[in-house]
Amino acid sequence: MLYIISFLKRTSKHVYKNETMKIVNGMLLLCVFALITMHTFEKWSVGQTLWWFVVTITTVGYGDASPSTVYGQVSAAIIIIIGIGLGAVLIGNIATRIICFRRNKMNGLGDYSDAKGHIVIMGWREDQTRRIIEQIFADDNRKNRMVILCSEKLETKPNGIKDTRFVKGNLASDDVIGRAGISGADKIIIYGRNDEETILATLGVVSSDDSDKAHITVYIEKRANSKHIERMTQYHGKISVVVSVVPDMLVQEMQDPGVAEIVRQLVENTDNGTIYKVYPHDHAWKAYYEAYQDYFMKKHGAVVFACETENRDIVINPSNNPVVHALYIINDKRPQKEEKEASYGQGQAYVGDIL
């Protein structure tokens, strides 16, 4: 009994800290008062009293039920005066909370710590980040994914970005990492305003994602800074580093005009041919590069041009026909997972799961 009394005290203290709950409790007490008085003085049933109570405090007043005794009318007057006041305050309080909730989301103060399987983009670079978000939603496999944008630079969610949540704050802070739901994210892109912000954000994410669940893609402007990210791979097994290739691309385009346009088309999520990474469906079977080349060409009309070997080395057009862990293909759409086995050349080939 003492435990129950103690529990009720603790609960009541917690409840009464919330203004909305105070009003709701007041309404419940007033409803109990109505049930007792209307049953005593008017002999109304519970259903009839509840209907009259709701119609009365909402000021609808259908008039299909009204007290006829003096004591019933006095009780009704008390209920009307208090009920209408409490109802107005309750509606105003709820409206204020909804407005504050929406404002918090727009201002980056929302909490998505319970999100699962979503994509997090850390950093804002105007048109570049807008393009990243556009390309994510252009991929059929990502259209229904929640995307959360984190930025310290932005004050509010950018205009023109739909279906994207916003979290404001220092990218490396525990607050932003927590509210962005990093622990439940499936993919993370770190694209800070500069390499220093990117490196610090990556360090914060790596230290918080102990399970190595999320795949982290990091953009680095200066090649020399990529070593800082590479050192973190010993603590997190799923980190990819993208180093700026603008100077290299300028030289390549100068020597072989048209290369830049081809690369642009290949990295876009369009129907003209895009690079996709596919995995063997059953890792217990050994599958060879040439077998996959044959299979994907016959089945999908796709071009296999590179692979990731068993040692996780990425090789373009290998000459020794290695056993592969994953393949890189060019196709007009992402191949879907298939259970059917296809045997070509050496070993077994499968269409695989897509990261």
Image: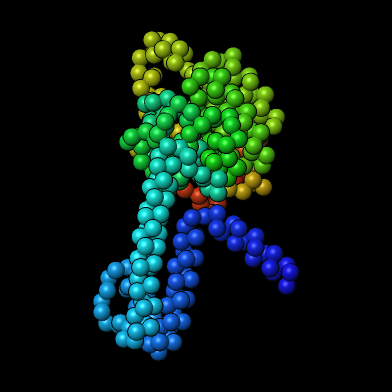
Q: Which part of the image, by quadrant, shows the N terminus?
A: bottom right
In this view, the residue farthest toward the right is 2
Residue occupying the point 63% across, 20% down: 228
Residue occupying the point 38% across, 19% down: 260
Where, by quadrant of the figure, is residue 3 drawn? bottom right
| Up-down relation of residue 251 to residue 94 (above or below) | above
Q: Is residue 221 visible?
A: yes
| Up-down relation of residue 232 to residue 136 (above or below) | above
User: Could you tell me residue 217's position as x and y percent?
Assistant: 54, 31
Q: Is residue 350 visible?
A: no
User: Could you tell me residue 83's position as x and y percent?
Assistant: 38, 68
Residue occupying the point 48% across, 43% down: 110
Residue closest to the eye, 9 or 322: 9
Residue closest to the eye, 272 or 234: 234
Residue closest to the eye, 103 or 207: 103
Count of marks placed on residues: 0
Where, by quadrant of the figure, is residue 12 drawn? bottom right
Residue occupying the point 38% across, 31% down: 130
In this view, the residue farthest toward the bottom is 43
249 lies left or right of 342: left
User: Could you tell me residue 200's position as x and y percent?
Assistant: 59, 25
